[in-house]
Image (cartoon, rainbow, N blue to C red):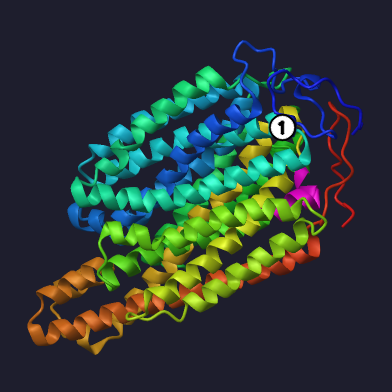
Amino acid sequence: MSSTTSPQPPGVPPAAFPPTSVPPTAVPGGWDPRSWRRAGPTTVLTVVLLAVLAINVETTVVNVAVPTLNRELGATTTQLQWIVDAYNLAFAALVLAGGGIGDRAGRRGTLVVGLILFGVTSVLAAVCTTPDALIWARAGMGVGSALVYPTTLAIITDTFRDRRARAAAIGAWGAVGGLGVALGPILGGVLLEHFWWGSLFLALAPAAVVAALLSWLVVPESREPHRPRLDRAGVTLSVLMLGSLVYTIIEAPDRGWTSLSTLMGFACAGAAAVAFVVVELRQAQPLIDVSLFTNLRFSAASGAVTIAFFALFGFIFLITLFFQLVQGQGPLTTGIRILPVAVSIAVGSVVGTRLAASRLGTKAVVTAGLLMLAIAFAWASTAHADIGYGEVAGQMVLLGTGLGLTSAPATESIMGVVRPEQAGAGSALNDATRQVGGTLGVAVLGSIYATLYARHLDGSPVVAQLPEAARTVAGEGLAQGLAVAQAAPPGAGLAVRETVIAGFLDGLQAGCLTASAVCVAGAVAVAALLPSHPSPPVRAGHAPDREPQVAP
């Protein structure tokens, strides 16, 4: 990149464009200070982060309502997982298309449409009366988010071209994600204390409308110059691949991990993945440039993000059940108790991107983050029913800091590889890794919990003495098991309760140890494969270096 600078755009703080950056006016599709909106980079970033906040709150607001939905709607464990996962699955399956649509049709318009769709489906979710209807409404919210989320990161990348400025903006983007993790459970707890469960979703609609209006007024339009056609075959195969994989994992505990239907589901996902790669390699205008994965800076960082969110979403799912059902906390106090993990994510994201952009490098920061996650999960596996909150808070701080140090620097690494005009596609890939990881985290860790919980109850002589109908209900999930214990005679009820909680803790321990092992494997892979620093910067309008061997 040339060190020659251009005149400073009027009204823009000097810090927004360091001397080594290329002014956005020099790059087609970048922020144009001559636009009638006259919005500076800081203003654009603020509005985009508002949209990000609305979407991130949704990812966790429903978690504190899981026990409530269990009681009010009679949702089974599998339905509860789908209520959480339907949003994540739709998001993950369609986010690749969302990024492509933004690049082709225009990022501002895509952002506005996605926010409006998100708001409408939030209202629909609020008035649902059955678990199945809520699952479909949540899926609709996921579709809206699939249009919004990749567009926000693409706009940030298109606005901030200098690496340090972009890293700081992406750090703020990651910090808002942590704030959303915090506000989701707290907002959910406040609403459940005073209103019905549907208010969790209804409250998000005004935020989406405000974000859509401000985005239309402030965010400049940007798109790929040639506006290629959307790769319909790639979209179809990506939906089939992700949908069949997550559906199979969620249903496996009931159908059996070695059953024919489960094996066929995994085979379908694998075949779709192979077909997707083959089709994308042959497409003149692919949905995803799969050759990006030959760049270690891109592929290793993508794997790190997937692992980090696999661990986080699975942990949030289980720890919410622990706080509310095992320790008897209300929705609001549960949300407040989850606050340490969210605050530490925000801090870790800001600090992590700064450290990665320094001489320390991305490899060291991301590896350290994954190792912190592994230690946090190994520590969490020692939890028992009477554990003090101080110890759990320490586990969450370690986990949140590790996730911030992992995800934000890895995201900056991913976005530093793609060309500016394809920022939507690059952002979609990053978001897909986040959502696939999160969805699989809930599915896998939730499935491990459900399997070991049911196995513990099946082998319990205390539960064997219950009537067959009561045994069946107790095996459906922790809330049902505790309800059976409460309805049992006084002497037997206490023994059943202890057995049910012991079964849950067996599942919690196995899930945490699984997440810890995955994080250790990820840390080893990142230490071996992820370059510490990007290749030398290129001139405006040129593609970044995509060679797989990047100097460490």
Q: Is residue 17 left or right of residue 454?
A: right
User: Residues in magenta?
Assistant: 292-302
Please name whichever residue, 268 or 516, is drawn nearer the observer in this view of the structure. 516
Q: Is residue 212 above or below residue 363?
A: above
What residue do we see at 23% from left, 47% from top?
A: 197
Question: Outermost residue, top direction?
Answer: 36
Residue placed under numbered mark 1 in the picture: 16
Locate residue 68: give its quadrant: bottom left
Q: Position of residue 158 (x, y in %)?
A: 70, 29
Q: Is residue 28 magenta?
A: no
Q: Position of residue 542 (x, y in %)?
A: 86, 29
What residue do we see at 31% from left, 49% from top?
A: 188
Locate residue 76: give its quadrant: bottom left
Q: Is residue 85 left or right of residue 436?
A: left
Does residue 447 show up?
yes
Element under label 1? helix
Q: Is residue 342 left or right of residue 403?
A: left
Q: Position of residue 28 (x, y in %)?
A: 77, 20
What residue do we see at 10% from left, 78% from top?
A: 488
Please name whichever residue, 71 or 130, is drawn nearer the observer in this view of the structure. 71
Please name whichever residue, 442 or 535, is drawn nearer the observer in this view of the structure. 535
Q: Quadrant of the C terminus?
A: bottom right
Q: Is residue 164 left or right of residue 316?
A: right
Q: Position of residue 125 (x, y in %)?
A: 29, 38
